[in-house]
Image (tube, rainbow, N blue to C red):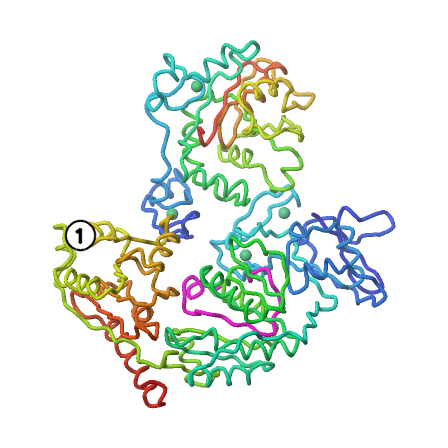
Amino acid sequence: MDILTGDHYCLWCEGRYFNDFNWRYLLGMSTNDGICSECRESLLSISGEICRICGRMLNNLSKEFRKGELCLDCIRWEDEPGWAGVLVKNRSVYQYNDFLKGILSRIKFRGDAVMVSPFMSPLKTLFKLEFPNDVIVVPIPLSSERLYERGFNQAKVLAELLDVQLKEILIRDSHEGKQSKKNRRERLAVINQSLFKCIDNVDLEEKNVLLVDDIYTTGVTIRNAAKELLNKGANKAYSLTVARG
Amino acid sequence: MKFASFLYEGQTLLVPEKLSSKEVIVDSPVASISQIPYWDTPPVTPSFTYSKQIQRYLSGKQLLLEELPFSINTIYEHYLNGYITFVKPINQLNERFYCTRCGNDKANLFASFLCARCDRECMYCRNCIMMKRISQCTPLVEWVGPEMLFGNEDYKMEWNGKLSKGQKTAADLFVKCIGSREKLLIWAVCGAGKTEVLFEGISEALSKGQSICLAAPRTDVVIELAPRIKKAFPMVEVVSLHGGSEELQERGQIVISTTHQLLRFNNHFDLMIVDEVDAFPYSIDDSLKFAVLKAGKNDATVAYLSATPDKDLRNKADVGEITSVRIPARYHGLPLPVPAFRWCGNWRKHLKRGAIPEQVNNWLTEQIAKNSQVFLFVPSVNLLESVFDSVKLKLQNVETVHAEDPGRHEKVKRFREGKTCVLITTTILERGITVSNVSVGVLGAEDNIFTESALVQISGRAGRSADYPTGDVVFFHYGKTSSMIGAENHIQSMNEEAKRKGWIS
Ligand SMILES: [Zn+2]
Ligand SMILES: [Zn+2]
Ligand SMILES: [Zn+2]
Ligand SMILES: [Zn+2]
């Protein structure tokens, strides 16, 4: 890679590409974003009208799955005793299409950590645009077994792209079942046994927290972590993810 | 897993973090194995009862610790007794990194992360990441105990077909090379019957107790070869390895494998046969060439097979750096069909208006009228649809196929069964497919995707069976290219050579 000529190999398709925004490098406004423009075009941003809480696109939802500025999922969460207001808002960068699915699984299941780099600049932008600048950034942790297996926590590697100090104050229980296999009622039963524990000796009074993860799918993981932090005194909980599944 | 080293009787030995107890005084920090500059492998303890399972699983391979279904205690015990060694996964020389598994040394195919296993920035290879990540702290484990012997002297070859004269000449030379460090190129025209050329030599290698690898770049070839080899050598353990294979951990005296799967082997085979050496991706991927060399023993016999060897291999044969033999004649003893060139004007412009050139249409109709099936090759995927729409206006049972087509295998099957009359295809079907009565057309033969070797392979689809030895081959073009002329010359010179030798009538 040559910073001045902007000549790179795409991390995804391995094709050579040329980054012609030279002046941006020189001004330190941009760094190599890792993938070529063709691959970049396969990533679809979240745009248009979105759910106020979970950040999913509303314009491709049919009428019965939305109500005003919220999606049906979020309405249910807000109706659930003990869960209203736990998550103030989630924002995600991209729609979860097959291309993004491929990139995320390459990161998680193949362990190709450097594949997070295309997400740096859009994550930073969304972070600055949507969240107060004094939030405490907390990556969603992996269980210690999973962490050893993978060698890194993808949520942490993503959070590091924001260039702010991270607080790794959550610990993940290792005996959680596969949540994707369960229906919503079973999941709701599970969420009452907490997946996460906050470490002792942290003072979150009056502080706002921002959870970072690779994907928001059902919202169970993120809300569970948020609740634990609220119990420890946090004021509001937000979240930021690459994908909205 | 982290490691430390300690001195014992003048040797520097490794110890995994988990097993380093108080009795062992380590003289290095417990860290990533990349931090330990040097270590020894203890001498073999002959009295040690080694695990036959580990030997079977690991011998001839280099695998990551996490690929082994054995406890670290057992593995370490084998190390201490000199049966297993640990190999540095990523080597560094000056600023350059090298992957031990795949030979990658391209800077853009390495990356690093803060590793939870070794607590430091850990470099990993992106080139071979599809087979479980190899990083600086994940040593490769290698068996250095006694080799696994197949001891199958009473194997029996169940093949008693007859070889053509050309085949016989090549087979005899191949047999002579077995047991030597010879490198051999068998250059056999499409339809020469190169698999049969190998049987005698494989049989000779088996009689010497050798372990044999038949590798090919494409999965299709592996799948096609496996049953033929199994049938010819029913008493020998034969396994086939490819992406979708369920035999990945099986051992066999004969291994039929994609070149990709060879990355797990190390210094194992006495006889390496590489089929279709000029095929993608082997032809452009250095790590696959590395894999073939690494999988074979240093003194292995290596045989390369091809109908269209590349320049490099041909040069080596010309200067005598490798031994070579040519089979210019088909098994059935009739000449290769020589392509006819037919100028068809600006066919792309034509096609934009919705029609393929009249000449192509007429030719297709003629072929169908004489009951031939037709392969119609086009230069790219995005042309398939418009060519299809045009052909379909006049003919029935027309299909298209390309590399990413999910229905690819079914479509090829339907064509083989004679259910399809015209199969419009990209260059993916240039190789390997044999249908008895087929004519071959290339629309846009001037396109530079049609290299000389691609055109030779494509022409080689026609006239394969003795019942229909003369299939039509036509290059429809908008200006002759040197590749087209090269292909024509190539085929003609093979026919002439075969005639000179009296191998064709
Ligand atoms: Zn790309
Ligand atoms: Zn919502
Ligand atoms: Zn590698
Ligand atoms: Zn490591």
Q: Is residue B123 magenta?
A: no
Determine which quarter of the picture holds residue B192. bottom left
| Image coordinates for residue B459, horizontal then vertical, percent | 29, 70
Front residue of B68 and B385: B385
Question: Is residue B489 shown left or right of residue B502?
Answer: left
Q: Is residue B275 magenta?
A: yes
Residue at the (65%, 79%) spot, across then down: B208
Front residue of A172 and B27: A172
Question: Is residue B355 shown left or right of residue B253?
Answer: left
Magenta segment boundaries in residue numbering: B262-286
Q: Give the total number of marks visible in the rendering.
A: 1
Q: Is residue B157 above or below residue B346?
A: below
Q: Secondary structure at mark 1?
A: helix
| Image coordinates for residue A11, horizontal then vertical, percent | 44, 48
| Image coordinates for residue A12, horizontal then vertical, percent | 43, 47
Residue at the (77%, 59%) spot, across then down: B51
Disc 1 packing (10 Å; few <14; some 14–19; many ≥20): some
Q: Is mark 1 within 8 Å of ligand 1?
A: no
Name the residue that disc number 1 marks: B390
